Image (tube, coloured by chain):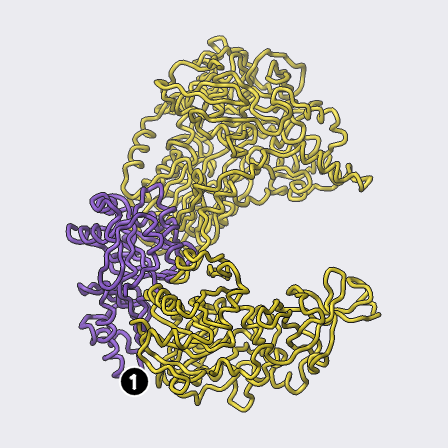
Chain colours: A yellow, B purple
Amino acid sequence: MADTPFRTSLQPQETLDRSRTISFTFDGRTFQAHPGDTIASALAAGGQSILSRSFKYHRPRGVLCGAGHCPNCLVQVGDEMNVRACMTLVEEGMQVEHQNAWPSLDLDIMSATALGDAFLPVGFYYKTFIRPRALWPLYEHILRHAAGLGKVDPNSSPDGYDKQYLHADVVVVGGGPAGMSAALSAAENGARVLLFDENPDLGGHWRFQRNQDPQIQELRSAVSNHKSIQVFNNTTILGWWEENWLSAVWGKRLYKIRTSSAVFATGAYEQPLVFDNNDLPGIMLGSAVQRLIHLFGVLPGRRAVVLAANDDGWRVAADLLAAGADLAAVADERGGDQAPDFAHKLAGEGVPVFWKHTIQSAYGGKRLRRVDVRPVDGGSAITLECDLLAVSVGWGPANGLLYQAGAKISYREDRNEFLADHLPPGIFAAGRVMGLHGVEAELADGKRAGESAGKFAPGSLHLDPSLRSGNALHSVPGIPNDSSPPESLHVAPGTLHPPTSLSPRSGFAQGMPRTSNRISVPGSGKQFVCYCEDVTLKDLKTAIAEGYDSLELLKRYSTISMGPCQGKMCSANTIHLCARENGWSVEQTGATTARPPMTPVRLGVLAGQNMEPVRHSPVHDRHLAAGARMMVAGLWMRPEHYGDPQAEVQAVRQRVGLIDVSTLGKLRLTGPGAPALLNKMYVNKWLKLDVGRVRYGVMCNDEGVITDDGVTGRLGEFEWYTTTTSSGAASVYEYIQWWAQSGWGEGVHIHNVTENFAAFNLAGPHSREVLANLTGADISNHDFPYMHVRQIEVAGVHCMVFRIGFTGELSYEIHCPAGAGPHLWDALLAAGEPHGITPFGVEAQRILRLEKAHIIVGQDTDALTDPLSADMAWIVKHDKDNFLGNRPLKRIADQGPVQKLVGFTMQSPGLVPEEGLQIVRRSDTADSQIANPGLEIIGWVTSSRLSPTLGKAIGLCWIPAAMADTEGTEFTIRRNGSLLTGRVHHGAFYDPEGARLRS
Amino acid sequence: MMLISPLHPPLEKSGAVFIEAAGWRQAQSFGDPEGELQAARQAVALADLSASARILVEGERAASVVQEALQVDAAVLEIGAGLDAGWFGVYRLRPDQVFVHGSAGQAGELLAALERKAGAGPPFTTVTDMTHGKAEIAVIGPQAAELLSRLCGLDFSEVHFPNLSARQSSVAKTHQLILRHDLGDVTTFALIGDRSLGAYLWQTSLEAGSDMKVRPIGLQALSNLAGTS
């Protein structure tokens, strides 16, 4: 087990519970940690400096930012890849492994790629590994193996992901001084506030500072205890969308947030410097050093060099000294006259200081060993032995969300920062993201922004309507407008250029310029601009020289800013380098577009909880109990069969069967206008259907294309009951409603009552006897003939019974209140038992209807099928008033259909051609040579089955009308390269006169 | 004959003890009525209210038909607002659509009263008994809004979804009519949607609230909840 040699004494701000020790493994080696440790902090405490290998060159990488922004600490934890070790708390027994290295993290053979980097220039995939083409699969295999991040575990559990919707008057993003101040101010203006922060505690950068300002603790407490503020720690905002719609991620949960206004107090990202070997483990940003010391009690190195270009670097130096490090030197790019007093005090205590110096090069293998420090203006370098280099050269405002929200962002030469200079209505910003540094300024700015946001929200106690228009925004304090100069940006005058004195309360200098404009130091080694994709300074220069000189082109060609950091570590440097290489200003160069997600997000988070609605019939459990094989039909689960569909067909033909047709769409039309509406919606006539009668109908759209079919019964003077196909219930209802509300709905109400009724079809020659056992009503053929409907009691349940016959047998479709469905199903089966009743499923129903040559809309028809071509000319009544499809159907009738749907049998009766097979004929046309040499496709099979009743294959198919019109015409079906012969069959295959269903 | 709720299979799987009430087979408890009551009062619970009466009245005269038939001030209700008449509730869904929500077994009585008045048109009014076509899941307890926020994009806060109000929205990718009808002082939302989707929505709701220890409760706990609130 690894010891923790780099653990410091207890730090005042640390988040560890040192009373407990837990253990975990990294690449099989056991490490100790305390609750509160991140994986990275625990590994650092144990002396593990390499956490990963780089994307392309497989160079060793260690902690760089310590804030979850860079790619350096991505690891595999269990079945989850690309876990940010610096943001993930250690858990007892956690198994952590490295990614993208073989055979081990310490000895990675793929690091040899660095030797062949002449073959891997920027955009190498456009230049090398292209020829010979035949070897590309080999190249691809090797490249894919060499590059990339973690490996997907196909057995990974999808459980635990979910999403939640949140609503607020004001959303505040960022829990630092400005964010907390904004949240409190907004809440005190009566707003419902949600505060999001990616860290485990509020305080932002103040969490890891040695000298704590008491104001921060008071503010933290006030925010946490305010009843109108809900704080979401460890939660990262992923993006902003129209109308203040934001998303955020917390663990495995995705939040979708709607807010009236938003305050972005997102702070700033510390930026790295570009110099030779600037990626060695042991080179960290200054804020990462502070996080390790103050939050986790870890000394990041024993002998340190600090590079400063602002006062923060000196604080890092002071922190290292206090934590017990040997400070080899502080190099400050500024002159001593620009440094704060406490820097001079440190210098006076014997710390070697190099004013106006920077870092030339770093050296080391798996860990930093020394650095060369040289004067900024050139000159000879001094070599310093060290195992830690803390780099504090500047900050880049985290303005990606502001950009997405529509803020206009421009470069401020005086600050070396991109800052928002115009905000859209409802969007506010505060703190470091607006270029303010120093607690007083940040607090004041947050208060101003929160107050404005609170007044903007409709729920505010002090709603200010003037804030809701774009023009009115110009009057809001602190919000810039087009006519005011950028200097008027903030409420605290002078905060942009204050003296660099110590704050009397915090010990922090107020509002000094923080960002070095020194981006790179000339050198000859590898100088990394992009840590994610291993893009070097040389790569960028090459790309620009090749003509990719605009920033967006440069990004796409070099892939810079397209890795896990999404530009947080590289964008600012790239912009400066691009500007310098082209001889442009930074303003002219511009910035790349910030797009969501702002941080890498697991696909499971985007997918959320598995929600796949599934519909169950009222007797679903009866089917399961009967051993049905269930099938998916749209959203419905339906019994495909109960073991032997052929036997089920025989049962219906010879005895009696029962099928659950509850899935049928059911519409209730009421009012005097119902028949007129039906007359327009269906191609046949409805005005004279008597009460108690039922009629089959076909519905077309206004192009004459069949959209649905079903039966409609007239239940009363003003009450009609229509069934649709199972899949068409919702769409037919919407379609009828659309036309009704467009002027055809006078005097009619339409309700979708699909779910109100269970429906069962009792079919077969014995069905009347079965039904008669359960009802006192007269159901004789005389009193209840074919195509009639009766409302009668069956098994004590009030039912609508339709005498119709999709199967071609005497049958009754019984509709009852859905809650009574199980009772009726059981009663029908019990009553049918003496007659050998059998439940039958969808497969048997399909065979039965095919024997009758009945079509299924959607199976035998498609998006171009009209009823005339579908051999249903008999149902189209052109001698009635206008109806949907009337004119196109008249045209088709005049011209005659080109193709026709027709029944067929096979020359080889036992051979069933699969549905979808092509029907072909011999042809020598050029077109026919492409897919099927010598054959022309003239049709296709839509339905086919072996009929157990007839003992031969039957089906429906589309063929040219001229062929279809003649009974017995032979045609050719192409199947797996062989040609089969089919014959045209007119009418039903079984009981063509319909005597059985009328019996 | 006993009427069966669409949630019967999942309730049975959860160990429900069934009784017959108002003609329906309903879950009396899940073996721990006191624990169920506490869950509803302190966290969140689900109950099957599919046996409730649900009647839709449509037409230009819908509100006045309800007002005259049931002797309530339905005509003054704003869209989305409801009223509690003791043994039933009334919610206005559209200018021409009113939803009447009653206890189990009351559908017939309500239907008869409404149809009597509806028949007095013109303009004609349609009364539709939706009782059998819907599953109804009550989400009960102080964490009810949070559970629902994991399934639905609506704002369930007190301000935007007060007691005795109705909204229609997608819940777990299904269309639902959502009623807020608190049981005494306990926040209660009723999800009313297609019967066939009831089992799916029940299971999905349980999964969404698993970290909140959501649990199903029966009639006994519901009754106690209403009585002790």
Q: Quadrant of residue A431?
A: top left
Disc 1: CA contacts within 10 A as few (<14), some (14-19) or many (>=20):
few
Give the residue at x 32% y 66%. A820
Nearer to us in this view, B129 or A802? A802
The residue tagged 1 is B122
> Percent from the top left, x then y, of residue A759?
40, 69
Q: Is residue B97 visible?
A: no
As helix, strand or loop, the secondary structure at mark 1 comes to: loop
Q: Chain of mark 1?
A: B
Q: Is residue A973 visible?
A: yes
> Percent from the top left, x then y, of residue A463?
31, 53
Amino acid type, label 1: Pro
> Percent from the top left, x then y, of residue A4?
46, 14
Give the residue at x 44% y 20%. A23
Q: Is residue A827 left or right of residue B225?
A: right
Nearer to us in this view, A247 or A767? A767
Nearer to us in this view, A114 or A180? A114
